[in-house]
Image: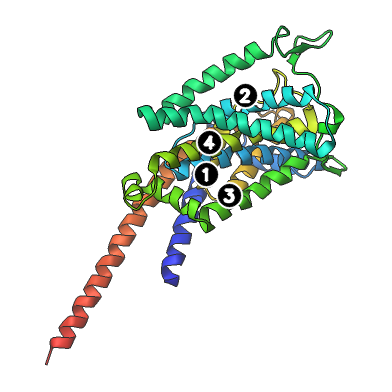
Amino acid sequence: MKKFDKDRLILGLAGPVLALVVAFLLTTVVLLVSGRDPFGLYPLMVDSAQFVDVQVNILNQTGTYYLAALAVAIGFRMNLFNIGVDGQYRLAVMLAAVAGAAVTLPGPLHILLIVVVAMVVGALWAGIAGILKTTRGVSEVVATIMLNAIANSMIAWLILPANFGVQLPGSNDLTTGEIPESGWMPGLDLDGGTVYGFTFVAFALGIVYWFILSRTRFGFDLRATGASGTAAQASGVDAKKMVLTAMLISGAVAGLAGMPMLLGQTHTYSLSFPVGVGFTGITIALLGRNSPVGIFFAALLISFLEKTAGSLETQGYEKEITTIMQGLIVIAVVVSYELVRQYGLRRQQQKVGEELAAQAREKKEAVAP
Protein backbone atom coordinates (compact mmCIF):
# COMPACT_ATOMS: atom_id res chain seq x y z
CA MET A 1 0.00 0.00 0.00
CA LYS A 2 2.83 2.39 0.87
CA LYS A 3 4.52 1.68 -2.43
CA PHE A 4 1.31 2.46 -4.30
CA ASP A 5 0.96 5.79 -2.48
CA LYS A 6 4.57 6.60 -3.31
CA ASP A 7 4.04 5.88 -7.00
CA ARG A 8 0.88 7.98 -7.04
CA LEU A 9 2.69 10.89 -5.39
CA ILE A 10 5.54 10.69 -7.89
CA LEU A 11 3.14 10.58 -10.82
CA GLY A 12 1.18 13.48 -9.38
CA LEU A 13 4.28 15.65 -9.13
CA ALA A 14 5.79 14.50 -12.42
CA GLY A 15 3.16 16.27 -14.56
CA PRO A 16 3.57 19.86 -13.29
CA VAL A 17 7.33 19.54 -12.80
CA LEU A 18 7.82 18.24 -16.35
CA ALA A 19 5.54 20.98 -17.69
CA LEU A 20 7.50 23.73 -15.96
CA VAL A 21 10.87 22.36 -17.05
CA VAL A 22 9.72 22.07 -20.67
CA ALA A 23 8.15 25.55 -20.61
CA PHE A 24 11.30 27.20 -19.28
CA LEU A 25 13.48 25.28 -21.75
CA LEU A 26 11.28 26.42 -24.64
CA THR A 27 11.37 29.99 -23.34
CA THR A 28 15.16 29.80 -23.29
CA VAL A 29 15.14 28.65 -26.92
CA VAL A 30 12.81 31.52 -27.90
CA LEU A 31 15.10 34.04 -26.21
CA LEU A 32 18.20 32.60 -27.86
CA VAL A 33 16.56 32.70 -31.30
CA SER A 34 15.50 36.31 -30.76
CA GLY A 35 19.00 37.30 -29.70
CA ARG A 36 18.24 37.80 -26.01
CA ASP A 37 20.28 36.48 -23.10
CA PRO A 38 18.07 33.95 -21.27
CA PHE A 39 20.56 33.51 -18.45
CA GLY A 40 20.17 37.14 -17.47
CA LEU A 41 16.38 37.07 -17.57
CA TYR A 42 15.64 34.66 -14.76
CA PRO A 43 17.99 36.25 -12.17
CA LEU A 44 16.50 39.63 -13.07
CA MET A 45 12.98 38.38 -12.28
CA VAL A 46 14.13 36.84 -9.01
CA ASP A 47 15.90 40.08 -8.00
CA SER A 48 12.75 42.07 -8.76
CA ALA A 49 10.71 39.83 -6.45
CA GLN A 50 12.95 40.74 -3.51
CA PHE A 51 11.26 44.14 -3.15
CA VAL A 52 8.46 44.21 -0.59
CA ASP A 53 6.03 46.10 -2.82
CA VAL A 54 6.44 43.49 -5.56
CA GLN A 55 5.92 40.71 -3.03
CA VAL A 56 2.70 42.35 -1.83
CA ASN A 57 1.47 42.67 -5.44
CA ILE A 58 2.32 39.02 -6.10
CA LEU A 59 0.45 37.87 -3.00
CA ASN A 60 -2.63 39.96 -3.82
CA GLN A 61 -2.67 38.71 -7.39
CA THR A 62 -2.29 35.16 -6.12
CA GLY A 63 -5.47 35.52 -4.06
CA THR A 64 -7.49 36.63 -7.08
CA TYR A 65 -6.13 33.88 -9.31
CA TYR A 66 -6.59 31.32 -6.54
CA LEU A 67 -10.34 31.98 -6.39
CA ALA A 68 -10.70 31.88 -10.18
CA ALA A 69 -8.78 28.59 -10.33
CA LEU A 70 -10.88 27.07 -7.53
CA ALA A 71 -14.00 27.90 -9.53
CA VAL A 72 -12.55 26.13 -12.56
CA ALA A 73 -11.34 23.18 -10.45
CA ILE A 74 -14.82 22.59 -9.01
CA GLY A 75 -16.09 22.13 -12.55
CA PHE A 76 -13.16 19.91 -13.48
CA ARG A 77 -13.92 17.63 -10.52
CA MET A 78 -17.36 17.10 -12.06
CA ASN A 79 -15.86 16.61 -15.51
CA LEU A 80 -17.32 20.01 -16.44
CA PHE A 81 -15.37 22.71 -18.27
CA ASN A 82 -16.60 26.04 -16.91
CA ILE A 83 -14.89 28.32 -19.38
CA GLY A 84 -17.20 31.16 -18.37
CA VAL A 85 -15.47 32.05 -15.11
CA ASP A 86 -14.26 35.35 -16.56
CA GLY A 87 -17.77 36.51 -17.44
CA GLN A 88 -19.16 35.31 -14.11
CA TYR A 89 -16.42 37.11 -12.20
CA ARG A 90 -16.78 40.42 -14.05
CA LEU A 91 -20.58 40.57 -13.96
CA ALA A 92 -20.59 39.58 -10.29
CA VAL A 93 -18.02 42.15 -9.20
CA MET A 94 -19.78 44.90 -11.14
CA LEU A 95 -23.23 44.27 -9.66
CA ALA A 96 -21.68 43.77 -6.22
CA ALA A 97 -20.00 47.18 -6.60
CA VAL A 98 -23.33 48.74 -7.61
CA ALA A 99 -25.05 47.23 -4.58
CA GLY A 100 -22.22 48.28 -2.28
CA ALA A 101 -22.27 51.87 -3.51
CA ALA A 102 -26.05 52.13 -3.20
CA VAL A 103 -26.28 51.50 0.56
CA THR A 104 -24.56 52.38 3.80
CA LEU A 105 -24.54 49.71 6.50
CA PRO A 106 -22.44 48.79 9.53
CA GLY A 107 -19.05 47.53 8.36
CA PRO A 108 -19.45 43.75 8.63
CA LEU A 109 -22.99 43.81 7.21
CA HIS A 110 -21.93 46.04 4.33
CA ILE A 111 -19.07 43.76 3.38
CA LEU A 112 -21.30 40.70 3.78
CA LEU A 113 -23.90 42.24 1.44
CA ILE A 114 -21.28 42.87 -1.25
CA VAL A 115 -19.90 39.34 -0.96
CA VAL A 116 -23.34 37.71 -1.02
CA VAL A 117 -24.40 39.72 -4.09
CA ALA A 118 -21.22 38.67 -5.88
CA MET A 119 -21.78 34.99 -5.06
CA VAL A 120 -25.45 35.05 -6.05
CA VAL A 121 -24.78 36.79 -9.37
CA GLY A 122 -21.91 34.44 -10.23
CA ALA A 123 -23.97 31.38 -9.29
CA LEU A 124 -27.01 32.49 -11.29
CA TRP A 125 -24.94 33.30 -14.36
CA ALA A 126 -23.20 29.91 -14.25
CA GLY A 127 -26.51 28.25 -13.41
CA ILE A 128 -27.86 29.21 -16.84
CA ALA A 129 -25.26 26.92 -18.43
CA GLY A 130 -26.08 24.24 -15.85
CA ILE A 131 -29.79 24.36 -16.66
CA LEU A 132 -29.12 24.23 -20.40
CA LYS A 133 -26.91 21.19 -19.93
CA THR A 134 -29.27 19.26 -17.65
CA THR A 135 -32.48 20.04 -19.53
CA ARG A 136 -31.37 20.33 -23.16
CA GLY A 137 -27.98 18.62 -23.23
CA VAL A 138 -26.18 21.81 -24.32
CA SER A 139 -22.42 21.59 -23.81
CA GLU A 140 -21.32 23.76 -20.91
CA VAL A 141 -18.30 24.84 -22.97
CA VAL A 142 -20.47 26.34 -25.71
CA ALA A 143 -22.97 27.80 -23.22
CA THR A 144 -20.36 29.48 -21.01
CA ILE A 145 -18.48 30.91 -24.01
CA MET A 146 -21.70 32.53 -25.21
CA LEU A 147 -22.50 33.72 -21.70
CA ASN A 148 -19.07 35.38 -21.53
CA ALA A 149 -19.93 37.45 -24.57
CA ILE A 150 -23.36 38.30 -23.20
CA ALA A 151 -21.86 39.29 -19.84
CA ASN A 152 -19.43 41.66 -21.57
CA SER A 153 -22.28 43.33 -23.45
CA MET A 154 -24.42 43.57 -20.33
CA ILE A 155 -21.58 45.20 -18.39
CA ALA A 156 -21.00 47.71 -21.20
CA TRP A 157 -24.71 48.63 -21.09
CA LEU A 158 -25.15 48.66 -17.31
CA ILE A 159 -22.16 50.92 -16.73
CA LEU A 160 -23.50 53.65 -19.00
CA PRO A 161 -24.26 56.91 -17.13
CA ALA A 162 -27.91 56.48 -18.06
CA ASN A 163 -27.99 53.27 -16.00
CA PHE A 164 -25.60 52.61 -13.10
CA GLY A 165 -22.44 54.23 -14.41
CA VAL A 166 -20.72 57.36 -13.15
CA GLN A 167 -18.30 59.35 -15.31
CA LEU A 168 -15.78 61.27 -13.27
CA PRO A 169 -15.00 64.84 -14.39
CA GLY A 170 -12.08 64.97 -16.80
CA SER A 171 -11.99 61.19 -17.28
CA ASN A 172 -13.18 58.89 -20.05
CA ASP A 173 -13.43 55.96 -17.64
CA LEU A 174 -16.81 54.88 -16.31
CA THR A 175 -17.28 53.59 -12.77
CA THR A 176 -20.13 52.37 -10.59
CA GLY A 177 -19.50 54.97 -7.89
CA GLU A 178 -17.36 54.54 -4.81
CA ILE A 179 -18.42 52.16 -2.06
CA PRO A 180 -18.69 53.92 1.33
CA GLU A 181 -15.83 53.27 3.72
CA SER A 182 -18.03 50.92 5.76
CA GLY A 183 -17.79 48.51 2.82
CA TRP A 184 -13.98 48.51 2.73
CA MET A 185 -12.26 45.40 4.02
CA PRO A 186 -9.11 46.08 6.08
CA GLY A 187 -5.92 44.29 5.13
CA LEU A 188 -2.41 43.71 6.42
CA ASP A 189 -0.32 46.87 6.14
CA LEU A 190 3.35 46.34 5.26
CA ASP A 191 6.16 48.71 4.32
CA GLY A 192 5.62 48.02 0.63
CA GLY A 193 1.82 48.11 0.54
CA THR A 194 -1.27 46.40 1.89
CA VAL A 195 -2.16 42.75 1.53
CA TYR A 196 -5.88 42.65 0.81
CA GLY A 197 -7.97 41.24 3.63
CA PHE A 198 -9.96 39.08 1.24
CA THR A 199 -6.73 37.47 0.04
CA PHE A 200 -6.63 35.55 3.32
CA VAL A 201 -10.29 34.59 2.85
CA ALA A 202 -9.36 33.22 -0.57
CA PHE A 203 -6.70 30.95 0.88
CA ALA A 204 -9.11 29.82 3.62
CA LEU A 205 -11.60 28.81 0.95
CA GLY A 206 -8.95 26.42 -0.34
CA ILE A 207 -9.21 24.55 2.95
CA VAL A 208 -13.00 24.52 2.67
CA TYR A 209 -12.70 23.20 -0.89
CA TRP A 210 -10.42 20.37 0.26
CA PHE A 211 -12.61 19.45 3.22
CA ILE A 212 -15.87 19.33 1.25
CA LEU A 213 -14.47 17.32 -1.63
CA SER A 214 -12.39 14.94 0.45
CA ARG A 215 -14.28 14.55 3.72
CA THR A 216 -18.01 14.87 2.98
CA ARG A 217 -20.66 12.76 1.29
CA PHE A 218 -21.47 15.62 -1.06
CA GLY A 219 -17.85 15.75 -2.21
CA PHE A 220 -17.80 12.02 -2.79
CA ASP A 221 -21.01 12.20 -4.83
CA LEU A 222 -19.61 15.08 -6.84
CA ARG A 223 -16.38 13.26 -7.66
CA ALA A 224 -18.23 10.01 -8.38
CA THR A 225 -20.59 11.75 -10.78
CA GLY A 226 -17.65 13.36 -12.53
CA ALA A 227 -15.93 9.99 -12.90
CA SER A 228 -19.03 8.21 -14.22
CA GLY A 229 -22.47 9.77 -14.28
CA THR A 230 -24.24 6.51 -15.10
CA ALA A 231 -22.49 4.61 -12.31
CA ALA A 232 -23.26 7.37 -9.81
CA GLN A 233 -26.89 7.43 -10.89
CA ALA A 234 -27.11 3.66 -10.49
CA SER A 235 -25.94 4.05 -6.89
CA GLY A 236 -28.71 6.55 -6.13
CA VAL A 237 -27.03 9.88 -6.96
CA ASP A 238 -29.05 12.36 -9.01
CA ALA A 239 -26.47 13.10 -11.71
CA LYS A 240 -28.36 16.05 -13.23
CA LYS A 241 -28.81 17.65 -9.84
CA MET A 242 -25.08 17.27 -9.14
CA VAL A 243 -24.21 18.89 -12.49
CA LEU A 244 -26.44 21.88 -11.74
CA THR A 245 -25.15 22.13 -8.16
CA ALA A 246 -21.53 22.01 -9.31
CA MET A 247 -22.13 24.81 -11.83
CA LEU A 248 -23.85 26.94 -9.20
CA ILE A 249 -20.99 26.49 -6.71
CA SER A 250 -18.39 27.10 -9.41
CA GLY A 251 -20.12 30.32 -10.41
CA ALA A 252 -20.45 31.46 -6.79
CA VAL A 253 -16.71 31.02 -6.23
CA ALA A 254 -16.00 32.76 -9.55
CA GLY A 255 -18.05 35.70 -8.31
CA LEU A 256 -15.67 36.04 -5.36
CA ALA A 257 -12.59 36.40 -7.59
CA GLY A 258 -13.05 40.16 -7.82
CA MET A 259 -13.56 40.71 -4.10
CA PRO A 260 -9.89 41.08 -3.05
CA MET A 261 -9.38 44.07 -5.33
CA LEU A 262 -12.88 45.56 -4.96
CA LEU A 263 -12.92 45.46 -1.15
CA GLY A 264 -9.22 46.14 -0.67
CA GLN A 265 -8.19 48.69 -3.30
CA THR A 266 -10.52 50.11 -5.96
CA HIS A 267 -13.79 50.21 -3.95
CA THR A 268 -15.54 50.59 -7.30
CA TYR A 269 -15.90 48.80 -10.61
CA SER A 270 -14.63 50.52 -13.74
CA LEU A 271 -13.79 49.66 -17.33
CA SER A 272 -10.14 49.33 -16.26
CA PHE A 273 -10.91 46.42 -13.93
CA PRO A 274 -8.74 43.37 -14.79
CA VAL A 275 -10.00 41.08 -17.57
CA GLY A 276 -8.90 37.56 -18.47
CA VAL A 277 -8.79 36.43 -14.84
CA GLY A 278 -11.04 33.45 -15.56
CA PHE A 279 -8.92 32.23 -18.44
CA THR A 280 -5.78 32.48 -16.33
CA GLY A 281 -7.65 30.46 -13.71
CA ILE A 282 -8.00 27.63 -16.23
CA THR A 283 -4.23 27.53 -16.68
CA ILE A 284 -3.67 27.54 -12.93
CA ALA A 285 -6.25 24.80 -12.26
CA LEU A 286 -4.63 22.60 -14.91
CA LEU A 287 -1.13 23.22 -13.61
CA GLY A 288 -2.23 22.66 -10.01
CA ARG A 289 -4.10 19.47 -10.93
CA ASN A 290 -7.24 20.69 -9.11
CA SER A 291 -5.46 20.33 -5.76
CA PRO A 292 -5.81 23.28 -3.35
CA VAL A 293 -2.08 23.18 -2.58
CA GLY A 294 -1.11 22.71 -6.21
CA ILE A 295 -3.40 25.57 -7.26
CA PHE A 296 -1.81 27.85 -4.68
CA PHE A 297 1.71 27.30 -5.99
CA ALA A 298 0.53 27.54 -9.60
CA ALA A 299 -1.23 30.85 -8.84
CA LEU A 300 1.89 32.06 -7.05
CA LEU A 301 4.04 31.18 -10.08
CA ILE A 302 1.79 32.94 -12.60
CA SER A 303 1.53 35.99 -10.33
CA PHE A 304 5.31 36.02 -9.99
CA LEU A 305 5.71 36.02 -13.78
CA GLU A 306 3.24 38.85 -14.22
CA LYS A 307 4.37 41.13 -11.42
CA THR A 308 8.08 40.85 -12.20
CA ALA A 309 7.52 41.59 -15.89
CA GLY A 310 7.64 45.34 -15.25
CA SER A 311 11.37 45.23 -14.50
CA LEU A 312 12.22 43.51 -17.77
CA GLU A 313 11.77 46.51 -20.08
CA THR A 314 14.36 48.54 -18.22
CA GLN A 315 16.93 45.84 -18.94
CA GLY A 316 16.22 45.41 -22.65
CA TYR A 317 13.69 42.58 -22.40
CA GLU A 318 10.13 42.79 -23.64
CA LYS A 319 7.57 42.27 -20.87
CA GLU A 320 5.54 40.09 -23.27
CA ILE A 321 8.11 37.36 -22.61
CA THR A 322 6.14 36.42 -19.50
CA THR A 323 3.00 36.01 -21.63
CA ILE A 324 4.93 33.68 -23.92
CA MET A 325 6.07 31.72 -20.87
CA GLN A 326 2.48 31.35 -19.66
CA GLY A 327 1.37 30.12 -23.08
CA LEU A 328 4.20 27.61 -23.20
CA ILE A 329 3.24 26.41 -19.72
CA VAL A 330 -0.31 25.70 -20.94
CA ILE A 331 0.94 23.70 -23.91
CA ALA A 332 3.51 21.87 -21.80
CA VAL A 333 0.88 21.03 -19.18
CA VAL A 334 -1.39 19.33 -21.72
CA VAL A 335 1.45 17.35 -23.29
CA SER A 336 3.23 16.41 -20.06
CA TYR A 337 0.06 15.28 -18.28
CA GLU A 338 -0.83 13.02 -21.18
CA LEU A 339 2.67 11.52 -21.18
CA VAL A 340 2.50 10.97 -17.42
CA ARG A 341 -0.98 9.43 -17.73
CA GLN A 342 0.18 6.97 -20.38
CA TYR A 343 3.24 6.08 -18.31
CA GLY A 344 1.02 5.56 -15.26
CA LEU A 345 -1.23 3.18 -17.21
CA ARG A 346 1.75 1.19 -18.45
CA ARG A 347 3.14 1.12 -14.91
CA GLN A 348 -0.15 -0.22 -13.53
CA GLN A 349 -0.32 -2.86 -16.26
CA GLN A 350 3.25 -3.88 -15.47
CA LYS A 351 2.49 -4.19 -11.75
CA VAL A 352 -0.63 -6.27 -12.44
CA GLY A 353 1.37 -8.54 -14.72
CA GLU A 354 4.04 -8.96 -12.06
CA GLU A 355 1.42 -9.83 -9.42
CA LEU A 356 -0.26 -12.37 -11.70
CA ALA A 357 3.10 -13.93 -12.51
CA ALA A 358 3.94 -14.15 -8.80
CA GLN A 359 0.58 -15.80 -8.05
CA ALA A 360 1.16 -18.30 -10.86
CA ARG A 361 4.58 -19.19 -9.46
CA GLU A 362 3.12 -19.70 -5.98
CA LYS A 363 0.43 -22.03 -7.33
CA LYS A 364 2.99 -23.95 -9.32
CA GLU A 365 5.23 -24.35 -6.26
CA ALA A 366 2.24 -25.40 -4.15
CA VAL A 367 1.29 -28.29 -6.46
CA ALA A 368 4.86 -29.37 -7.16
CA PRO A 369 5.89 -32.66 -5.38
Task: Return the residue at label 1.
Answer: 287
Q: Which residue is mark 4?
A: 248
How far apart marks 1 and 3 lie (CA) works out to 17 Å
How is colour applied across the structure in the image?
rainbow
Tell me what residue is drawn at x 61 percent, y 51 percent: 208
Please name the amino acid that badge 4 sits on. Answer: Leu
Camera-nearest label, 1 or 4: 4
Look at label 1 and name its amino acid: Leu
Q: Position of residue 123 (x, y in %)?
A: 57, 32
How far apart marks 2 and 1 lie (CA) works out to 26 Å
- The residue indicated by pointer 3 is 209
Which of labels 2 and 1 is toward the front? Answer: 2
Helix, strand or loop status at disc 2: helix
Left/right placement of residue 67 relative to residue 10 reads: right
Q: Secondary structure at mark 3?
A: helix
Find disc 2 in the rendering and name its residue: 91
Q: Residues within 10 Å of mark 3 (few under 14, many from 20)?
A: some
